[in-house]
């Protein structure tokens, strides 16, 4: 999608043009103008709104990489507006428990999903310094998320499916310096899933999804421990729906479709950062 490429390009360009964000407080600009690496765990709950349907849940490990910047809107500007940009990637992979039925046999089964999740998001927004050194940051967001669902079980045939979707929408972040090198933050996003679908890799079938919402909330705490080096922790919750697909003829004897589903994910990440400010 063109808007995704443009947003990512703008985000990378701003992140590479690093200089002190004079409008923001020193603690906030140091926390936001940085490269970060993290490890963590994510719990996933997946439910299909059909009977009989599939259900999955489980906690899996992962890691994240991000780069962000908070820059003055104009060189030498010390008061009003900053430019905020970020590029965030998260990867989670592991085993989650599956219960439900297989599409071809219809038989209930308990199995394991060897799941892989990828999520990338680019942000571009404005930062407004506030009383007490706080920074108010509304932003636009675009990105991509994917889930490779690989189910195996001795009880019957497995499944190798890929769920994927583009992301676009709005967000808001508030950074609050709380003293002693700590910066607390809260972020809320309302995104749309668009241009997505499912691919059944084993049966050479695919279907497209409609547009559905995704909500995400994140809380963070950053601490400058030594010079430019920081440690941080984040906790998040996100919820979204895949719209499903209409029935399609598959061979001569049956139709195939993906039902409407709900996914809820929450987790925590811990890591280190290096500030360029």
Image (cartoon, grey):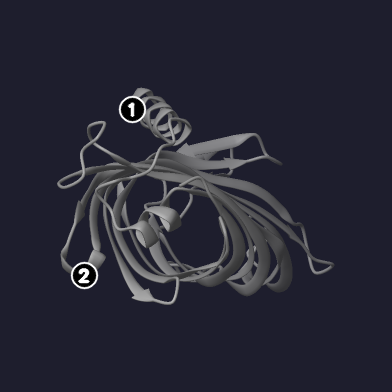
How packed mark 1 is, by other alpha carbons closer than 10 Å (few <14, some 14-19, many 20 or more), is few
Q: Report crowding for label 2: few under 14, some 14 to 19, many 20 or more residues within 10 A (C-alpha).
A: few
Q: Which of 273/94 is in front?
A: 273
Q: How many numbered discs?
A: 2
User: Position of 180 compared to 213: left or right?
Assistant: right
Image location (x, y in percent) of residue 110 = 71, 75
Looking at the image, which residue sits at the far right?
154
Indicate the quadrant containing the N terminus: top left, top right, bottom left or bottom right.
Answer: top left
Q: Mark 2 points at which residue?
A: 132
| Residue 263: percent from left, percent from top | 46, 65
Disc 2 element:
helix
CA gap, disc 1 and disc 2: 36 Å
Residue at the image point whose x is 44% and y is 48% from the top: 33
Image-based side of 24 in relation to 167, left or right: left
First in sequence: mark 1 or mark 2?
Answer: 1
Residue drawn at point x = 43 percent, y = 30 percent: 17
Identify the mark at residue 3; answer none if there is no mark: 1
Observer able to see residue 230:
yes
Helix, strand, or loop for circle 1? helix
Observer able to see residue 98: no
Any mark on residue 22, and which?
none
Q: Residue furthest top?
A: 2
Q: Answer whether labels 1 and 2 touch (C-beta < 8 Å).
A: no
- Please tell me which residue is depicted at 39% across the width and 32% down the height of the picture: 14
Residue drawn at x 41%, y 51% is 244
Whole-percent x and y of residue 266? Answer: 49, 72
Residue 126 location, quadrant: top left
Which of label 1 and label 2 is nearer to you? 2
Near-viewer residue (117 or 88): 88
């Amino acid at each position: 999608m063109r808007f995704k490429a443009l947003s990512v390009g703008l985000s990378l360009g701003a992140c590479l043009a690093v200089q002190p964000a004079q409008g923001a407080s020193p603690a906030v600009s140091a926390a936001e103008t940085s490269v970060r690496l993290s490890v963590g765990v994510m719990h996933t709950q997946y439910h299909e709104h059909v009977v009989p349907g599939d259900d999955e849940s489980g906690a899996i490990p992962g890691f994240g990489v991000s780069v962000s910047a908070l820059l003055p809107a104009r060189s030498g500007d010390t008061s009003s507006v900053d430019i905020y940009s970020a590029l965030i990637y998260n990867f989670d992979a592991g085993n989650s428990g599956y219960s439900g039925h297989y599409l071809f046999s219809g038989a209930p089964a308990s199995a394991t999903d060897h799941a892989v999740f990828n999520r990338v998001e680019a942000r571009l927004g404005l930062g407004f310094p506030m009383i007490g050194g706080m920074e108010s940051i509304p932003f636009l967001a675009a990105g991509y998320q994917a889930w490779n669902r690989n189910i195996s079980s001795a009880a019957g045939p497995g499944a190798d499916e890929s769920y994927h979707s583009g992301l676009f929408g709005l967000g808001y972040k508030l950074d609050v310096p709380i003293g002693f090198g700590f910066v607390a933050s809260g972020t809320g996003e309302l995104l749309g899933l668009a241009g997505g679908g499912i691919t059944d890799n084993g049966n050479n079938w695919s279907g497209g999804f409609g547009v559905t919402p995704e909500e995400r909330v994140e809380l963070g705490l950053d601490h400058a421990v030594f010079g430019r080096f920081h440690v941080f922790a984040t906790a998040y919750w996100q919820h979204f729906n895949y719209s499903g697909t209409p029935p399609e003829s598959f061979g001569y004897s049956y139709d195939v479709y993906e039902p409407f589903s709900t996914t809820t994910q929450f987790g925590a990440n811990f890591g280190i950062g290096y500030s360029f400010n």
